[in-house]
Image (spheres, rainbow, N blue to C red):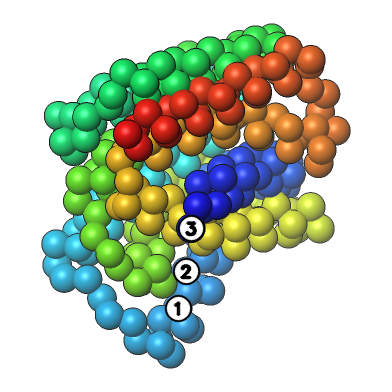
Amino acid sequence: MKAAPWLFVLLWSGGFTAVAIALPYTEPLTLQVLRYAAVVLLLLPPVLLLRPAWPDARGLRHLARMGLVIQFSYFACTNLALSWGISPGGLALIVALQPILVALLSARVTGDVVPRAAWAGLLIAFCGVALVVVSGSAVAARDWPGLVFAVISLGAMTTGALLERRDGAPCHPLVSNLVLYTVGLAATLPVAWALEDMRVVWSTDLAWGLGYLVLVNSLISMTLLLAMLRAGEAARVSALFFLVPPLAALLGWVVLGREVAPLAWLGTAIVALGVILARRGAAR
């Protein structure tokens, strides 16, 4: 499905707006607990009814490891970075280094070789992301823990992309998602219990934000991401993440009314050009 990469980017980018809508009504890790608990409750009935095939012990270990790396570490550190005062622009710029790290490490970890044409596209896309971030002058971090959590989230997503490309195997999406989010819930719940009050103010905005995170970001987007990583080069798939910060900014403008500077539109166009070049270069 040729549209899958672009559909993934659009749906994944919408998660940032959904989090922004939901966070005023609960704390970051508590929101993650609510999200994962809802996903597990939604997946259990069809898994029990359809009884899809489960992976072997090696496959289960890989899924559990991915649940810890992505569902717990990446998302938790992203939320904590924002709660410690790093700006969304600063976080976006740090996480946007992920495709570069994947390209540097993919030959050693997965055996994928990144050609020069793909490298040129990656660097062009990174420059576009930098323009989007600088256009809003939003690169500040209030406290150093925010920077630490942002760097850890970058490492977690990079590790997850490489591990999935190297060790991922075809698995029924109901089963893979159930294992991933069960592990993520089991890891997040005690941390949220220890660090937060876990109070929730139920509202329509929280319901909309949480609903998007559960149905679209957690189920559809994650299924597309894992399928693409298994089917294509890690660097080629990871290049798509360059489009996330610009699209998140545009969606914030449409949904939340947050102004987008003219320089950000130029940066978005440069990012799109870089991603196209990177994916074509990797395909060759």
Where residue 83 sits, quadrant-wise, is: top right
Element carrying mark 2:
helix
Rendered location of residue 26, percent (x, y) = 66, 47
User: Left or right: where does residue 1 sit relative to residue 60?
Assistant: right
Element carrying mark 3:
loop
Element carrying mark 1:
helix
Where residue 104 sits, quadrant-wise, is: top left
Q: What residue is disc 3 on? A: 1
**CB under 8 Å between discs 1 and 2:** yes
Q: What is the spatial separation of the Cα atoms under label 1 and label 2, in whole angstroms?
A: 6 Å
User: Left or right: where does residue 71 sit relative to residue 28?
Assistant: left
Between discs 1 and 3, the one toward the N terminus: 3
Q: Nearer the viewer, mark 3 or mark 2?
A: 3
Q: What is the spatial separation of the Cα atoms under label 3 and label 2, in whole angstroms?
A: 27 Å
Q: Of the numbered discs in the image, which one, if any, rests on residue 40?
A: 2
Task: Give the residue type that dot 1 points to.
Answer: Leu
The extreme front residue here reads 284
Q: Of the numbered discs in the image, which one, if any, rests on residue 44?
A: 1
Quadrant placement of the C terminus: top left
Q: Is residue 229 visible?
A: yes
Rendered location of residue 5, percent (x, y) = 50, 47
Rendered location of residue 7, percent (x, y) = 58, 50
Where residue 152 sits, quadrant-wise, is: top left
Q: Residue at x 81, y 41 (%)?
A: 255
In the rendered view, tell whether residue 103 sits above or below residue 127. below
Q: What is the spatial separation of the Cα atoms under label 1 and label 3, in whole angstroms?
A: 28 Å
The residue carrying pointer 1 sits among few (fewer than 14), some (14 to 19) or many (20 or more) residues within 10 Å by Cα, namely few
Q: Residue at x 31, y 29 (%)?
A: 102
Front-lying residue, 23 or 244: 244
